[in-house]
Image (tube, grey):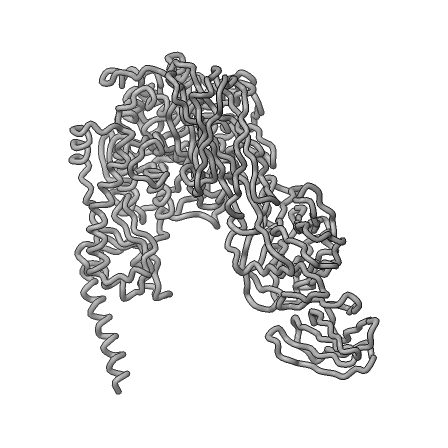
Amino acid sequence: MCKFWMKLCGVVLFSLLANSAFSQDWKLSKAMQQELAERNSDEHHILVVGPNWANWDSLNLSVRSKGITRKERAKYVMTYLKEIYKKSQDKIINEGDISRDDIEHTFWIANVIELKASTQKVYELMTVGEVQSIQLADEIKIAPVEFEKSESVQSRSIGGIEPGIEAVNARFLWNLGYTGKGQKVLNFDTGVWPDHPAISENYLGNHKPLDEVWFPYDKIIPGDKESSHGTHTNGTCIGLDRSTNDTIGIAYESMFIATDPIVSNAADIRTFPNIMRGYEWALNPDGDSTTTDDIPDVINNSWGRTFDSIFLPEVCGGIVENTLIAIENAGIVSIHSAGNSGPGSGTVGLPSGSNPSLVNNFAVGAVNADNPSYPIAGFSSRGPSYCPSSGALEIKPEVVAPGVNVRSAVRNGSDYTYDNYQGTSMAAPHVSGVSLLLTEAFPNATAEEIKEALYYTAVDLGDPGEDNTYGRGMIDAEAAYNYLAQNYTPSTPQTNSFDISINKITPSNELSLCGDSFTPVIHFDNTNTVDKSDLSVTYGFYGSAEMTQSIGTGTLQQQDSIVLDPVQIPSSGYLEFYAEVEYSGSNQELNSVNNTRFIRFKKNGNSQLPYLETFENIDEFLYSSWIKNDEEANQSWEIDSALSSNGTENSVATMQLSSYLTGSGDRDFLYSPALRVDGQNQLHLAFDYSYQLKFSGFQDSLIVALSTDCGNTFQRVFEQGAEELNSTDKTLQSDWTPQDTSDWEHVNISLPQVADGNDVIVRFETYNERGNNLYLDNVEVFDPAQGSVGHNAIVNKPELEIFPNPVEKTLNWKSDENVYVVEVFDITGRSVLTKTVKGEQSISVSSLNSGAYIVSFEMQNGESVRERIVVR
């Protein structure tokens, strides 16, 4: 009876809440209303939006009165937003009785709380006065990048300058001495290949720790997608191959930082809250609210999606617009591609079509710079804006720039090269590059003023006046400079030539497989000779104690090197080592950023024998005692969850060969910890793998090798191609995952003799022919005479041979000793079959279900051997 009334009261309460909230259903987005109406789930991933308390007019007056520079604005704005929105969000959390465990993120760049909530909680939150709206977290999804490859391709242009650079009149600012020195761009795109020779010297990661220069979504270590879209746009913004003087970029002495949220595959698209996290990082990359030299001057956004009217409240006056307003007020020039949905009217994309001001959001259309009349590209999205407005606010894009047949940096397989792409994605970085030159020339101009200069001085194209095809017209770097010079005195370009630069640290091996210390050597590339007594070096591993060393006396030559004292390697995993030279002399340096140099390498761990790895305690190889090395820096060994060889869903190592992006012929390596041999006479290597042959033509390979000299040489101990590697007779899957224990094959290898005191390293290598996925589990190295540590207890005596395995009906064996009793255990350790065989050499297993089993063979002499079998 009590239970009945409690349930009834709950229904009544829920009904009252729903009715109370009904009058405020305007707070729910259309997508949120639809999800509640469908009642498919009681859990919802939502964004709770509070009031926009940011008073930007008041803040800007305060900034000007306090003399806060553009560089300092970001930290000022961040502190301001965190303070005002924390009060609002605390009120929502308290009045809405939101559990902190349900909150995924509290944003400060806009007043938003991301959380998981029940249907009842959604209705409760609607009644909280502080709540302005509730929407689904995944309502606005950012589309995969769109661009076309041009037919005309010129891989390199020695000493050349791209026609698009000439078209925007960047040479005028170069001639004045402005090349982007001291400026930073954040490339908000698919990622970047930082080692491409056109941009490698501009990568701030050469001089700063990784977490200050790279905000990872898809790749923990910087890299790009298969398209190289982000590398291409970054090259247009800042690229210069110094070995050939091939100029593909505009602000070629600017530095870059990057992030990789934008994808090429529709299945991987991200939501706008994901994007907001990257923008929050952009305002404080080093995590220190007192510094300003970490913040980008410009953000290039060559991404977006088509607009749908269902997004109108979230974009126009909502969280999208509020986020972009915050970026501009933080002093960062944010440039956006208009979209590639032209030539129809009203095709400008999201978020480039929003318009809280004349220059925010600053949308860029694409023209053909190979034609002197600069005709609009057919694909370039047109206005008007979808946000309610009139007059100039309604017109989109703001400006146009070269976006047809644009040559820039890409990677093809493992080769760094160049290709011609087209799209408004290629137009936006032309504007970002010019913006970097202008922020160098006018460091006190606001982000809004930089964009206004580009907007008001653009060269009119098409119909006279601003229009929804060309906007104000083609940007003109010279005219924008002269416009800003009316109100600001241009900064004097840096002309001093004195510069101390660490351009390399050795050894720079990507892998370090043995040893607990190394002796670093720093190599200089200075513009002048320097008195060594004016120099000292601080060095160490990032996050660990640093060391300081004087360089001595005498003269440091322009190209010179210094051997530092040995450094203890603190741990295994992905490590960052740095050296910073401090100069105390009287000369003014041209660039102090390059006084510091970082190198990064992977160090495997150390362990004892016997050794077993089930991969259960590894989330990411990068931070484990195992290390992976993928030469193409794209796709490699990963940890995934799959049905393992013991019949349960567990973590396993996998190489997803079926979805390999860079084509066939690539090799990927996975290295074990260094295993110290101490009294083991005869080592064995055992492991389980699962692989399905796709077709005979797809010859993937697995190669296992052993090193006893710290990875200098490896001896192969196992190698199989795809047909031999096949471990299942299941129906073909193009994206293979093991279905049951019979899909796993067990391997046991007797290894070559290893002397005491040596370290053994096992290397698993895949050769990709784009066939099917490979899974690896239960890697064990042991001496059978000393016993196995594996829960599978795979092999204890080499003198017993079993066959066939996998087995269907009859299991056979050969042994030097007579077998007396055979007992079979399932994976839980339960005995399922026992038979006294008294010297027989076979047993029927037809009564057993398919799966993995452990078979114990008890000999007449009292010894026992345990083997793992798979019954089909």
Above or below, comparing residue 802 to residue 57 in the picture? below
Q: What residue is shown at x 55% (from left), y 28% (from top)? A: 418
Above or below, comparing residue 796 to residue 64 in the picture? below
Above or below, comparing residue 205 to residue 757 in the picture? above
In screen coordinates, is 370 left or right of 128? right
Residue 855 at x, y percent in the picture = 70, 74
Residue 633 at x, y percent in the picture = 56, 40
Q: Quadrant of the N terminus?
A: bottom left
In screen coordinates, is 779 left or right of 403? right
Q: What residue is shown at x 50% (from left), y 18% (from top)? A: 554
Residue 180 at x, y percent in the picture = 39, 22
In screen coordinates, is 841 left or right of 305? right
Q: What residue is shown at x 37% (from left), y 65% (from top)? A: 40
Residue 693 at x, y percent in the picture = 69, 55
Residue furthest to the front in view is 553
Q: Please state which of residues 368 and 276 is positioned toward the viewer in this rendering.
A: 276
Above or below, comparing residue 357 to residue 703 in the picture? above
Residue furthest to the top in view is 175
User: Dividing the picture into quarters, in which one does residue 255 lie?
Assistant: top left
